[in-house]
Amino acid sequence: MKRYCSDLKEGLPVIVLMSHGPFAEALLESAKLIAGEIENTAYLCLEEGDNPLDFRKEIERLLNSFTQRKIVMVDLLGGTPCNSFVSVVN
């Protein structure tokens, strides 16, 4: 799985993107082409062959590393990234 976290600035929420494959990474890279470097962003990409349980643990680690509020976006409602996120926050 691929993971990224930008520089963090207190007081602002963190935008976390999660996807199957490189979609979350590509979305953030495209946004950077338009807006320049973007603080308080992170992504987690589930890649082929990744264990869903390891992905869930990585979501926990990533979300627990932030003290500020989080805005989480996933690529597909009901997919593994979405379901793993829901199981972590429940």
Image (cartoon, grey):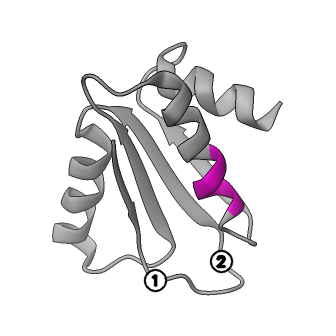
Residue 1: % across, % down: 33, 41
Determine whether 24 is above or below 63 in the image.
above
Q: Circle 2 is placed at which residue position?
A: 12
Write the residue at 63% across / 33% down.
85
Closest to the observer, 48 or 35:
48
| Residue 34 left/right relative to 11 | left
Q: Are marks 1 and 2 in contact (CB under 8 Å)?
A: no
| Residue 82 left/right relative to 86 | left
Write the residue at 30% across / 80% down.
37
Which label number is shown at residue 7? 1
Closest to the observer, 66 or 74:
66
Determine whether 7 is above or below 13 in the image.
below
Main SS category, magenta section: helix
> Is residue 63 shown in magenta?
yes
Residue 36: % across, % down: 25, 79
Q: Which residues are magenta?
A: 60-64
Q: Amino acid at mark 2?
A: Leu
| Quadrant location of the C terminus in the rendered image | top right
Disc 1 is placed on an element classified as: loop
Q: Amino acid at mark 1?
A: Asp
User: How far is the residue under mark 1 from the one under mark 2?
Assistant: 12 Å
Determine the image quadrant of residue 47.
top left
| Residue 28 left/right relative to 12 | left
Badge count = 2
Closest to the observer, 87 or 23:
87
> Is residue 8 shown in magenta?
no
Determine whether 57 is above or below 3 in the image.
above
Write the residue at 26% across / 38% down.
23
Write the residue at 49% across / 35% down.
55
